[in-house]
Amino acid sequence: MVSRVIPVEPFDLVIFGGTGDLARRKILPGLFRRFCAGQMPKNSRIIGAARADMDAAAYQAFVGEAISEFGGARTCEDGTLQEFLAQISYQTVDIRGDNGWDMLKADLSGDGRVEAFYFSVGPSLFGDIAERLHRFGMATPDTRIVVEKPFGRDLDTAKALNATLATHFEEGQIYRIDHYLGKETVQNLMAVRFGNVLFEPLWNSQYIDHIQITVAETVGVGGRGEYYDKSGAMRDMVQNHLMQLLCLIAMEPPAKFDPDSVRDEKLKVIRALEPVELHHMVRGQYEADGDEPDYRTAVNDPRSRTESFVAIKAHVSNWRWAGTPIYLRTGKNLVARSSEIAVVFKPLAHSIFSTGEADLPSNVLAIQLQPNEGITMNVTIKEPGPGGMRLVDVPLDMTFAEALGEEGGDPPDAYERLIMDVIRGNQTLFMRGDEVEAAWAWTDPIIEGWQARHDVPKPYEPGSSGPTDSDQLMIRDNRKWREIKV
Ligand code: NAP
């Protein structure tokens, strides 16, 4: 079976920060792939905007290089790159000043098509862009704006940012991006849960022992040390990506698969999260590894108390999840790059086999998001061949990559999909303002508690699974983290 590509209507997309890292690595190559797949119509326009002084030809060359470096392996017919580049222009704009905005407006097609503005710049510029789009007559009721993370650094700043954007745009025009939500498997998680009769009846604390959500990276802070040290794993990963995954796994079935029904249910999950007890969290900082500096050296602060690892035992306080903890874990410089949600079911109530029920492995539904996307269900079967009823635990693979792959290559990556959703006007996979605020309202007291107690993160070895205290968090509950592996 081959998935269908449904073209979107022609659009104008302005990328503020069009020369930046995100535009180069993700947005522009992603748009090119959608163009190759036939999803982006040929008369659509992409306008890069930044302070650098360059003309359209120089920007097209920049985009061509970005595509050859980050374009991925997908094939495209000869000449397609030139056709794509012909749709690209550039406008020099100083977001903090008034230069370039009139020219930008004049460059828009202005024929009633969708106009989207991607804020791919530092968050301190979001308010300036919104205000100037309004002042220079580009904020119409049909305009869409795409806002990158981080969305605030605490509840107060997120509220202020929401209020600034709300001065110029309706909530229905604001697309707050969390690229985890654009992953194929995240959407498949909803399809598996709500499109099958098999899972939903078991999706509660009666049958599920616990859930583990792990987002592990092998890289350290790299060149982002200064930024990262002001944020830490809690703000950089838990408040947004892990929280979004937790919502999708724990939410009630929405009445419909429409943006507000889904986001209403996610919001209820965040609001049902209990405050986290002190002994239910572990923070860590990675140590040195050969020539690689330790965390404190990497961020150039020998006294830094910011965490590069965090593990949390969370509880969603409602009827469905009472008694079933959700363990969250994320960190840098860990043993493998792997993002996974594992739903671990309870042991059998009674075993008819000579193996006692306690010795039978639990069923596990594992949803891998990174580096390879896929869903596996571990089930117990009889080991083939003679030798009596010997039982083995085997994965039932639900990846279906080949069966469902798009014609000519892989399915779209998260950014490609999300940008096309912006053009279609579908906000289901974007965070609503109240969701972001609720997530900060849960996160803030945790961070404030660490600061008030002058909490010092535990050291951990690079290439490990985090501090040993993180293992203890599970062992105390008679449970075990799943191995972090690709
Ligand atoms: P970046 O590499 O520093 O690029 C910033 C862009 O903004 C450049 O194009 C820069 O061009 C432009 N810019 C800066 N000040 C400007 C001004 N006053 N007026 C007009 N343009 C201005 O940043 P990035 O890594 O692309 O990140 C962009 C946003 O995406 C940030 O919010 C970041 O947190 C978020 N994000 C990035 C990644 C990633 O992988 N990079 C991942 C997730 C989220 P000029 O200097 O020429 O003006």
Image (cartoon, rainbow, N blue to C red):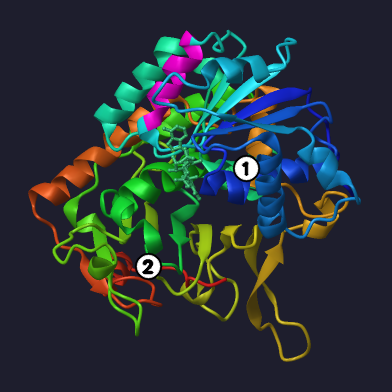
Q: Is residue 267 left or right of residue 449?
A: right
Report the quarter where the C terminus lies.
bottom right
> Does 73 sit above or below residue 176?
below
Near-viewer residue (446 or 341): 446
Residue 401 in the image: x percent, y percent?
Answer: 77, 58
In the image, residue 180 sits, relative to residue 294, either above or below, namely: above
* Residues packed near mark 2 inside 10 Å, few (<14), some (14 to 19) or many (20 plus): few
Task: Say what secondary structure mark 2 lies in.
Answer: loop
Residue at 37% x, 48% y is: 236
Q: Residue at x 51, y 38 (%)?
A: 52
Marks 2 and 1, how far apart in space? Answer: 41 Å
- Quadrant in which residue 292 is drawn: bottom left
Residue at x 39% of width, y 39% of height = 150
- Magenta extent: 125-135
Question: Label 2 belongs to which residue?
Answer: 479
Q: Residues within 10 Å of mark 1 (few under 14, many from 20)?
A: many
Residue 360, compared with residue 106, is above or below; it is: below
Residue 185 visible to an observer of this rendering = yes
Label 2 close to label 1 by CB (< 8 Å)? no
Residue 324 position in % (x across, y down): 39, 50
- Residue 27 - label: 1
Q: Position of residue 9 (x, y in %)?
A: 79, 22
**Residue type of the residue flagged with mark 1:** Ile
- SS class, disc 1: helix
Residue at 57 percent across and 81 percent down: it is 354
The answer to whether residue 186 is seen in the rendering is: no
Q: Position of residue 152 (x, y in %)?
A: 33, 34
Q: Is residue 429 left or right of residue 440?
A: right
Q: Camera-side residue: 13 or 399? A: 13
Q: Amino acid at mark 2?
A: Arg
Q: For this view, does 338 lie left or right of residue 82?
A: left
Instruction: Locate residue 165: give its quadrant.
Output: top left
